[in-house]
Amino acid sequence: MIGTPVPPEAAVLLVPLAAAALLALLPGYRLSARINVVASALSLLAAAQLLFHRPGAGALLFVDDLNVVFILLNTLVGFTTSVFSASYIGHELEIGRLTRGYLRFYHAMYQLMMFGMNLALVANNIGLIWVAVELATLTTVLMVGIYRTHEALEAAWKYFILGSVGIALALFGTILVYLAAQPVIGEGPEAMVWTALIGRAAEFDPALLNLAFVFLLLGYGTKVGLAPLHAWLPDAHAEGPTPISAVLSGLLLNVALYALLRFKMLLAANPGAIAPGPLMVALGLVSLVFAAFMLYRRRDIKRMFAYSSIEHMGIIVFAFGMAGPLGNFAGLLHMTMHSLTKSAIFFTVGHIAQVKGTQRIAEIRGLTESHPVLGWSLVAGVAAIAGLPPFGVFMSEFLVVSSTFARAPLLALVLVLGLLIGFGALLLRVTGLAFGEPVGRTGPVRASTLPIFVHLALVLVAGLWLPPGVVAWFQNVARLLG
Amino acid sequence: MPKLYFDVAHTLAGSLVLLSFVMLYQRRLGALLNVLALHAAVLALSVAWQAHIQGAPHLYITAAIALAFKAIVVPMALRRMIVLLGIHREIETVTGIGLSMLAGIGLVALSMAVMLPVTAGADPVAREDIALALSVVLIGLLLMVTRRNAVSQVVGFMSLENGIVLAATGAQGMPLVVEISVAFSILIAFIVIGIFLFRIRERFDTVDVQALDRFRGERR
């Protein structure tokens, strides 16, 4: 899109929006799947341009070092998931779980969801961020319920109700931020523009900001999946189509986290406000330890990895809560690594569930024997997510732990305990899944393994050698986050 | 600003809180929907009053949407739905009515205690509106928690949204973008709910959410 008049920050919005309109009209699923891939690739290209060309802050959209990380990650995983999705839904159509009409709907919703998430990331208006997060939520609700089974409907309903309540609380928090800004900046749209807010946040009424942050933390925290607000997350991950589980874990949780980080920066810029760190640290640790224990009792493979997402979001929120250049750097790196690894795991799990015809852990055994490629991918993915070297997750977790040990050894003990408990659960499960005598169906598999390999390769490379450019970039963002 | 302005604004916001309490003790779905319609109508009045005293004509749009959509269209549609399902006479509450009323009183006290000191510097109309709005939001949450019928959960959610609209309009000069988006998202949200209710009907022949709980993947 180089040389076109559309600026890249608008292109990451217009491409998915146009694609959604187009896909809603097209009947054929093969063509739709391809268009879905092409549109996601174009969004990725547009996002990549943001690395080199940084537009100035507008009243509605703006791009800085922080959201570039999120946008790039978002469009990258959106693209690889669309490739995975193309082969996944072909199979679902064959076995009759989805009909053509639903697929048309599915593809349109996929692009609409990408639009919503990208909009939340580039928006320069706290009201607009809220609208975008709500849009992304509604589209994913519809997609979670797309199979129309009992479980899928229950999951979608639960997700919808809890998500709406969370979002409603976040809006209340947003209104309170406006109320805090209004006496300083004046009435009107300007008092909701993030770049204007951050410039004068020091003059806001700290008490109002504190209260606003509590609502925002509860509201967006529900969407991040922090315990005890996580109840929707495992169901939504387990019952929806697997590509949606991948984007939920890999992207949507990050988008909500991004919104939270923006407000955290506002609080950090105000000397009178409470430090948001301890709240985030507490919620993060609770999520980590809780999810780590819950991992042991899972019988459904997608549900298990959903709990693992709660665990990792806990670590990430903890790291951002600890703040400081090192804490933020570690949080950012861990978020990137988690998105890449967890979506790769869901790609693998999606194919495994299709071959085996079940998601129950007890009915899946000996994958490395029956389906070596999928089996070993799963082993690699789980090793990565459990934090084994040489993968990138090891490095980011190591950074989180070591930076915490330096500042708050007691917290670090709890952190390490949670990590070890989760580690044990994952190892226990993966040995059953991957090794031993194969059971159940052992038919051949038509999997698109490329997205899995690309993600795992990226995580591996990041674990072995992080390019200095990326390090400098993340350090810069970490400073920005304060 | 004349004192009448404050008094009317507070009366309307206070009536919203009272109506939220009325919702808490409705036993039958039909009656609950009537109160929801009244709730939305009072909200529309309150928003229109804010439009008048703030001299903000765009708020009249929000008021009109609240009146037409939330006070008329939605309650009528929901009523049709419950008559079709044959559940317009039933309602179950998880906790007793007395207990939920007490909890409601506690929530109002809580929101007053939290909001009033915090907003001491803010404009007095906005200040008490926000405190009352928070009460409406919290009672809406309580309603959602204590009811297990899908329709009454929707009612709870709508009353919660009413509280948020009250807060948004109480905040002087809050940009129009937001009000429209709020109204619009309620519309979308309702469509979604509608679709889901019909799907639930297709699959379960009941809208009792607790009946859904059985199907949870792990309780087998």
Image (cartoon, coloured by chain):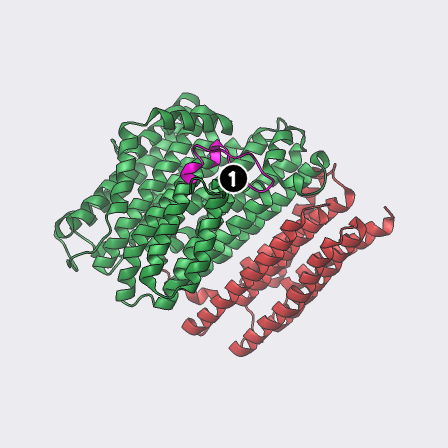
Chain colours: A green, B red
Q: Nearer the viewer, residue A32 or A350?
A: A32
The residue type indicated by label 1 comes to Leu
Residue at coordinates 51% horizontally, 32% vertically from top-left? A278
Q: Residue furthest top?
A: A406
How many numbered tags mark residues here? 1
User: Quick check: A320 above or below A353?
Assistant: above
Residue at coordinates 36% horizontally, 27% vertically from top-left? A399
Query: What residue is shown with label 1?
Result: A260
Residue A396 at x, y = what percent?
35, 31
Q: Is residue A50 magenta?
A: yes
**Residue range highlighted in magenta:** A47-67
Residue A268 seen in the figure: yes
Residue at coordinates 58% horizontally, 55% vertically from top-left? B141
Residue A380 at x, y = what percent?
23, 40
* Mark 1: secondary structure: helix
Residue A318 is left or right of residue B68, and the answer is left
Residue B103 seen in the figure: no
Chain that bears disc 1: A
Assign the magenta stretch its main secondary structure: loop
Q: Nearer the viewer, residue B160 or A13?
A: A13
User: Quick check: A165 above or below B71?
Assistant: above
Residue B78 is left or right of residue A438, and the answer is right
